[in-house]
Image (spheres, rainbow, N blue to C red):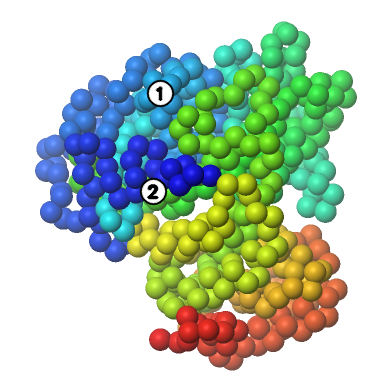
Amino acid sequence: MSQAELLPLRAPAGTAPAGHPAVPVPPGGVSPARNVVAAADVHPLTDATLPLHEAQLSVPTYDRSALTPAVVHFSVGGFHRAHQLLYFDELAERRISDGWGVVGVGLHSRTMKEALAPQDHLYTVVERSPDGERARVVGVMVGYHFAPENPAAVLDLLTDERTRMVSLTITDSGYRLDPRTGLFDADDPDIRADVREPSSPRTVFGYLVEALDRRRRAGIQPFSVVSCDNMHRNGDAARAAVVGFAQLRDEVLARWIADRVAFPSSMVDRITPHTSPEERAAVAQRYGVDDRWPVITEPFSQWVIEDTFSAGRPPLDAVGVRFVADVGSYELMKTRLLNASHCALGYLGSLAGYASLDQVMADPVLAGYVARLMDVEVTPLLPPPDGIDLAEYKRTLLQRFANPAIADGLPRLCRRGSTKMPHHLLPSLRQAIEEGRPHGLLTLAVAGWFRYLRGTDEAGRRLPVEDALAEQLQALARAGGSDPRPLLGETSVFGDLGSHPAFVADLAAALTALDRDGVRATVAARTPGPAALPR
């Protein structure tokens, strides 16, 4: 992959489009006061007000009314708006194609619709680097539906022959797959309801399967289903879930989907923190845009997709997306280096009292730990992806983690540990154990999670544990203390890791050290080299 494919879509990192210079950003991410726009010059964001905003930031120059609603995306959040939508927006902006407009669909909350509908589905993306920030308005979203309000409209949209691709960011737990067998778990009231009443679905799989059945009966080519969730072989997960649901309805339909529908796996990467009210106010003050829900993100963006589509593929390779025959090695690179490092730093950094990832990376002990974790314990386990220099990729990761203009909050990194750890970090640990490779730093990350689950940092301050299994995992963590065996007994999360005596003993020693010596001393003792010495 060329360096150009790792950079922002319109300009190199730290620069801005002509006429819109990058604005310096202090630590913490909020624009400096000298750039405040007078209150009278702050205007709502709509199609009609775009001319008022073009002097302050980039706005769409293409005809939004000419966009074809060809992509439907389920679960529109900050990441989707900072990542996939920008690539489609760039297709329109560069006049490469106007045939790939996007319609969003929400299943669980009206919040996104309430934010975007009054703005004609426009929103602002602010890219921040240590050198400054630049902003653009994205216009490629042409509609949004809150599905429970009108299921028929969503089914009509999915059945429309203009819809050629459906993308998903429903989180890894949303696929309802048994972690041990990989099979679709039909034991859910909403799934059973969707089987009984296919015309009023509650789940994404109910919508997809009913729409595909209608397309099949009407002789309309099926759309492609593109997962953009952080899972290894996410296309296989989407296929297993959709086909598994279809089998509950009709075996013939299930075979047709398995034979005719493409489920390309993809790897997506862009750090996108949650937008706070303070960030929204800062966007209004700096750019004069009263945006109900802007997005703050980093300059880096990457998307790799398997080149298999049912109804033609969008020309995303013209704007930096890489199409490949097999995305597996790219997914492993990203999940085991970036996402696993996020987990390790999130838990250990929170225990040490830090609030954001850049604060963690400013600590040479923890920065040295994650660098060595990636170099010594994870990289030797990875098949090198074609066109990627792993050494350069890791250097870029360390720079991104340390970006003070993003100040990625650690609570975001610590959420859903019972899902993230088995997908991102535990596979490397298990492989290292099986192959007899070093894994002490991976073990320390697990110890950090176990200690985090007790719900307080090393100074006794409360830590938020946001996890579907929080109640049972916290009870086991508190009961076990420095003994990891109660938690390791949760085989749905840890598999057979508890059956390796040497690992269990090392994990217990790491927990004891965290309790006795604290995070920094424990990490320093386990991370040799000058970078790990305490300040």
| Residue 121 quadrant | top left
Residue at numbered disc 1? 92
Q: Amino acid at mark 1?
A: Ala
* Residue at 57% from the left image edge and 14% from the top image edge: 162
Task: From the top left corner, tell me how far across and down residue 93 is, in percent.
Answer: 36, 25
Q: Quadrant of the C terminus?
A: bottom left
Task: From the top left corner, tell me how far across and down residue 507 is, in percent.
Answer: 71, 80
| Residue 240 quadrant | top right
Residue at numbered disc 2? 299
| Residue 427 quadrant | bottom right
Q: Is residue 287 visible?
A: yes
Nearer to me, 466 or 97: 97
Q: Amino acid at mark 2?
A: Pro
The kind of secondary structure element at disc 1 is helix
Q: Left or right? Give the position of 499 relative to 113.
A: right
* Residue at 40% from the left image edge and 23% from the top image edge: 92
